[in-house]
Image (spheres, rainbow, N blue to C red):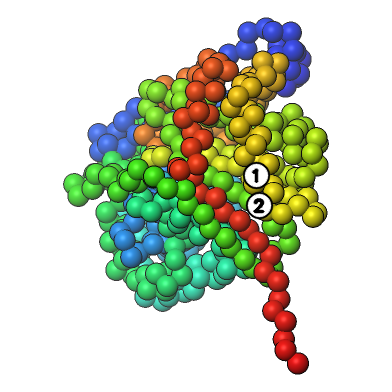
Amino acid sequence: MPRRLSLLFALVFGLAVPAGAETVTSFQLENGMDVVVIEDQRAPVVVHMVWYKVGAADEVAGRSGIAHFLEHLMFKGTEAFPDGIFSDIVEANGGSDNAFTSRDYTGYFQRVAADRLELMMEIEADRMTGLILSEDDVATERQVVLEERNQRTENSPQALFDEQRSAAQFLNHPYGRPIIGWRHEIEALSREDALAFYRTYYAPNNATLIVAGDVNPDEVRALAQTYYGPIPPSADLPPRLRPQEPPQTSERRMTFSDSRVSQPYVVRTYLAPERDPGDQHAAAALVYLAQLLGGEGATSVLGEKLSFEKKTALYTAAFYRGLSVDDTTFGLVAVPAEGVSLQQIEDEMDAVLAGFLEDGVDQQTFDSLKMQLRASNIYADDNIQGLARRYGEALTMGLSVDDVQAWPDVLQQVTPDDVMQAANELFDRKKSVTGWMMREEPKEVSQ
């Protein structure tokens, strides 16, 4: 029986299917580099990832965007692999590669045939210490990043709105600045800034290696020791301490107007706890809360009340992303129907929340959602790159392999009472940020 059909059969008929059934081996090199090997022999493919425990929130004030900028510069080359040929080598070997930067981490990955793993380690280990940057490289790539900001942020009213809303949410914590950086600070980033950031944070004792696919843990260990093992750890790695948010005692509100806005909407966000090492229960309850309030259309509380009963909303949603080093956010979205004002849809959203807090969780909906979450966790194991990313992201946040493997069970342990406790602790208007995305009407020109 095909794997997906057998999983579906088991879910429907209640048979035992182990969540997180992947075989995982973890160890640490003498220089402090953590290594996680995820075995999956279904295809002769391997995903090789190096995750650095540094992101936009670790930047020095006034140098926003340097983490993302360095990610771009890491493809410029080394003495052994010059002139930006890294990606060309990966492609020539039938693979693909890319990189990404978040508030809390920076990652680099290649997906190649399993017998090309050693080559990927050789190249990636080389650029951990051997990056060469010229002034021309920096000037060219800085312009590329500025153009990326133009395309993704300046030309998007929603991105500009989200950027301003995040700054309002985090008054003191560096999560309030954009990952790509503020434009005026990107323009000032220098070669010295990039190299200083590189020398400080790009070290084996600040990195996690994830190797997933058709591999043998002993062989991976030998390769890792050969290529990453000789790299000395950084003795100057600073502790990961960020300024934290002071207690919020007053509701914050903002409006954003732009003539390019096609559909106004309301967003409300609250500071919320992240998944903590050894204690993920509060985060798991918030996952359910987000799904119950703003999940699938008519089955969600907001969708059922506002889109289908009252027909005052075109769209509703709730969101929560628990993987974060520090406190994250829980958000609600309501897009008003034609003729419905932003104030009206916000008031109706609040009325629905008040009703939910009074009535509690519908047991039948909750049971269905629990089954859906269990199924999604099982199906997620079918994507080897997604599986590697799941471990890499969690470990750079300070979670452990045990935490990652326990997460599906933690989700299954949540009760309706847990969800309601989380909701009552979360929904305090004094601790919220409400943003109105508005269409700016063109000004009349006097004749």
Using the rendered image of the protein, determine whether residue 27 is visible from the camera's viewpoint.
Answer: yes
* Image coords of residue 103 (percent x, y): 43, 49
At 47% from the left edge and 52% from the top edge, which residue is drawn? Answer: 252
Quarter containing the C terminus: bottom right
Residue 147 lies, with reference to residue 277, above or below; the image says below
Cα–Cα gap, marks 2 and 1:
6 Å
* Image coords of residue 203 (percent x, y): 30, 47
The disc labelled 2 sits on which kind of residue? Gln
Q: Residue furthest left?
A: 235
* Image coords of residue 5 (percent x, y): 76, 18
Q: Nearer the viewer, residue 2 or 254?
A: 254
Quarter containing the N terminus: top right
Q: Nearer the viewer, residue 18 or 305?
A: 305
At 38% from the left edge and 23% from the top edge, which residue is drawn? Answer: 278
Q: Nearer the viewer, residue 34 or 66?
A: 66
At 72% from the left edge and 22% from the top edge, which residue is drawn? Answer: 4
State the SS at label 1. helix
Q: Which corner quadrant of the image does residue 400 belong to?
A: top left
Tell me: 229 left or right of 143.
left
Identify the residue under disc 2: 343
The answer to whether mark 2 and mark 1 are in CB contact below 8 A is yes
Identify the residue under disc 1: 347
Residue 353 lies, with reference to residue 437, above or below; the image says above
At 34% from the left edge and 71% from the top edge, which residue is drawn? Answer: 190
Label 2 environment density (alpha carbons within 10 Å; few <14, some 14–19, many ≥20):
few
Residue 323 lies, with reference to residue 138, above or below; the image says above
Tell me: 232 left or right of 364.
left
The disc labelled 1 sits on which kind of residue? Asp
Q: Residue furthest bottom?
A: 447
